[in-house]
Image (cartoon, grey):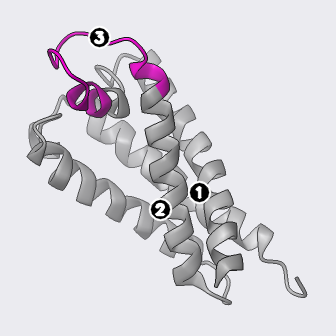
Amino acid sequence: MMRNLVKGAASGALATAMMSAVMVAGERAGLMGGQPPKHIVRSLLPGSERKRKPGEGALAAVAHFGFGIGSGALFGLMARRRRARVPAGIAYGLMIWLVSYAGWVPKMTVLPPIHRDRPGRPVVMAAGHVVYGTALACALNRLDKPGE
């Protein structure tokens, strides 16, 4: 059980890095209007939610990787001893996106729900979560070679 947790966490770290690349590309293309992890962290720090705050970038990166690593660990536990299927990883990534961006993130009034958000951000975030799920399953399978 502990081995699956650790492998899932390591896979989650790699998958989060790959997802972050998609998010940065989306921002550079002008589709994001700011990274969601920064919006979330900014809303939790004291002061105005609209103003940038010192350290928010670093805190957002730590929070994003922490969430991705924790989600990866959970996926590792769910996969147990069988190979993680890429479609299951994609479904898992999209489930995280829906639960977050149609659920708790709008409830915190950080960002609007998916159907009311700016047109580009939901597309980029959905694509990022597909990349996350794919990378998560592939990395977990790579770490989970038979005989180990």
Pointer 2 and pointer 1: residues touching (CB < 8 Å)? yes
Dot placed on the residue nearer the N-terminal end, 2 or 1: 1
Q: Which mark is residue 52?
A: 3
Q: Secondary structure at mark 3?
A: loop
Relative image position of residue 19 (x, y in whole percent): 53, 43
Q: Secondary structure at mark 2?
A: helix
Q: Which residue is mark 2?
A: 71
Q: Amino acid at mark 3?
A: Arg
Nearest to the eye among marks 1 and 3: give it.
3
Q: Residue at x 59, y 57 (%)?
A: 12
Q: Amino acid at mark 2?
A: Ser
Pointer 1 and pointer 3: residues touching (CB < 8 Å)? no
Dot placed on the residue nearer the N-terminal end, 2 or 3: 3
Is residue 43 on the magenta stretch? yes
Q: Residue at x 9, y 37 (%)?
A: 116
Q: Residue at x 62, y 61 (%)?
A: 9
Label 1, label 3: how far apart the Cα atoms are: 28 Å
Q: In the displayed structure, does residue 58 sit left or right of residue 42?
A: right
Label 2, label 3: how far apart the Cα atoms are: 28 Å
Q: Amino acid at mark 1?
A: Gly
